[in-house]
């Protein structure tokens, strides 16, 4: 009997141990399943995160290179259209460049307001609040920014005058002098220093433009009797000077300010429209009274106005998604395309001096935009899309 009792007791203890171990095994299996599921979820999250980053990278690359393509198209297209609209009248009166500048300023002002409106979540109250804060309640800011506004109006009128008297390629090459004037004003107004490489690039740029200017009328296939090359060159040199000063002045105002770029453009738009309208009636008031404000306007002229107005928006997108190096390459590429398009569309012929000068300008532009050795690693990190 004792043996039987001992056996029963042993069986009971064994059953107790087994029953205790079974839940423990179940817990281990459940824990293992949870860990497996957690690992799978973590892996899925990583895959989704990588896919999102890949999509963002692809989208950023698409926007970056797409905006650069648009910039080249805008640079070349605007010059070609402006040149065509100023030289091919087809028996119609020549449109007034002052009115075109005014219309462009109005369109640009409306476009910048649209960007601010969209950025505020399509909220009318938010848009009005922004305008009240940065325009109506900041009259001194608007007065200060009227300096580059005035210069930009003069500059745009000078560019029309230049393209009336110069072929598109000569215009593009000579207008690169704005790099030199910008550098000089940056050194004097912003105390900015430049490396020997950049100064060398500026010297090459000056030589290249000088060679193009002295290439003479032989660079042109045909010269209309009402065109004045000297006047065109003077206009483009003045435009380069105003571009350099106004650009540096605007940059100085942007530094240390929390006001957005678009709101700054709105602040500039108000005095720009006023000054452009004053220029219209001071310069062409008599013709407007006789023939009307939109005399000589055609589809081509309106296209010029629209392309010129959206040019600033394209540059802003390029600055945001690309970098200055790529933007400079786009400008250089635009010079080459302008030369080719002028030869194809307008029968332009170039002599050896012009080609040498244009090549020097392109070389100097690329050399000037080349980052310094100590900045290359930082630049690479900066331009990577995030």
Image: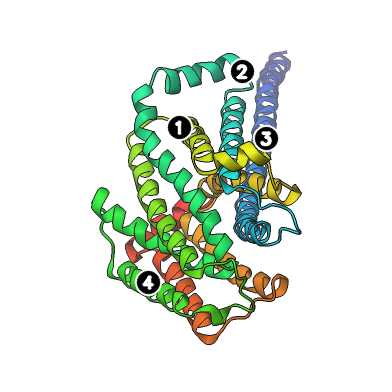
Q: Is residue 333 visible?
A: no
SS for callout 4: helix
Label number found at residue 109: none
Between label 1 and label 3, give the one nearer the viewer: 1
SS for callout 3: helix
Between label 4 and label 3, give the one nearer the viewer: 4
The answer to which of marks 3 and 2 sits earlier in the sequence is: 3
Query: In the picture provided, is 208 more to the left or to the right than 161?
Result: left
Between label 3 and label 2, give the one nearer the viewer: 2
The residue labelled by disc 3 is 41
* In-front residue for pair 110/274: 274
The residue labelled by disc 4 is 206
Q: CA distance from mark 1 to mark 4?
A: 33 Å
Q: CA distance from mark 4 to mark 3?
A: 62 Å
Q: Are marks 4 and 3 in contact (CB under 8 Å)?
A: no
Q: CA distance from mark 2 to mark 4?
A: 49 Å
Q: CA distance from mark 1 to mark 3?
A: 58 Å
Q: Are marks 3 and 2 in contact (CB under 8 Å)?
A: no
The residue labelled by disc 1 is 271
* In-front residue for pair 75/99: 99
């Amino acid at each position: 009997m004792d043996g039987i009792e001992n056996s029963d007791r042993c069986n009971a203890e064994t059953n107790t141990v087994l029953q205790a171990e079974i839940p423990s095994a179940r817990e281990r299996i459940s824990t293992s399943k949870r860990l497996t599921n957690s690992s799978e979820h973590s892996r899925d999250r990583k895959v989704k995160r990588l896919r999102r980053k890949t999509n963002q990278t692809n989208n950023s690359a698409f926007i970056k290179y797409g905006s650069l393509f648009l910039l080249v198209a805008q640079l070349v297209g605007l010059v070609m259209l402006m040149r065509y609209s100023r030289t091919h009248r087809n028996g119609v009166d020549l449109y007034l460049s002052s009115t075109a500048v005014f219309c462009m300023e109005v369109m640009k002002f409306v476009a910048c307001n649209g960007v601010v409106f969209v950025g505020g979540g399509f909220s009318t109250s938010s848009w009005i609040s922004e305008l009240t804060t940065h325009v109506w309640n900041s009259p001194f800011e608007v007065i200060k920014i009227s300096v580059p506004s005035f210069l930009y109006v003069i500059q745009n009128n000078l560019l029309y005058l230049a393209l009336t008297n110069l072929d598109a390629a000569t215009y593009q090459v000579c207008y690169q002098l704005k790099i030199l004037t910008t550098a000089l004003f940056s050194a004097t107004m912003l105390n900015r220093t430049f490396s020997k490489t950049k100064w060398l690039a500026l010297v090459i740029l000056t030589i290249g433009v000088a060679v193009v200017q002295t290439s003479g009328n032989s660079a042109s296939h045909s010269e209309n009797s009402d065109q004045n090359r000297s006047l065109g060159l003077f206009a483009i040199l003045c435009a380069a000077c105003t571009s350099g000063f106004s650009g540096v002045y605007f940059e100085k105002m942007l530094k240390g300010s929390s006001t957005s770029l678009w709101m700054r453009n709105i602040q500039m738009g108000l005095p720009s429209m006023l000054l452009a309208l004053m220029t219209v009636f001071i310069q062409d008031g008599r013709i407007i009274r006789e023939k009307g404000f939109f005399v000589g306007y055609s589809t081509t002229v309106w296209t010029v106005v629209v392309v010129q107005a959206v040019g600033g928006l394209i540059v802003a997108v390029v600055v945001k998604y690309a970098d200055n190096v790529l933007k400079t390459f786009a400008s250089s590429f635009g010079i080459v395309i302008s030369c080719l398009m002028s030869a194809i569309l307008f029968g332009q012929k170039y002599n050896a001096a012009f080609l040498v000068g244009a090549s020097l300008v392109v070389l100097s532009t690329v050399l000037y935009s080349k980052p310094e050795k100590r900045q290359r690693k930082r630049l690479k990190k900066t331009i990577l899309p995030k």
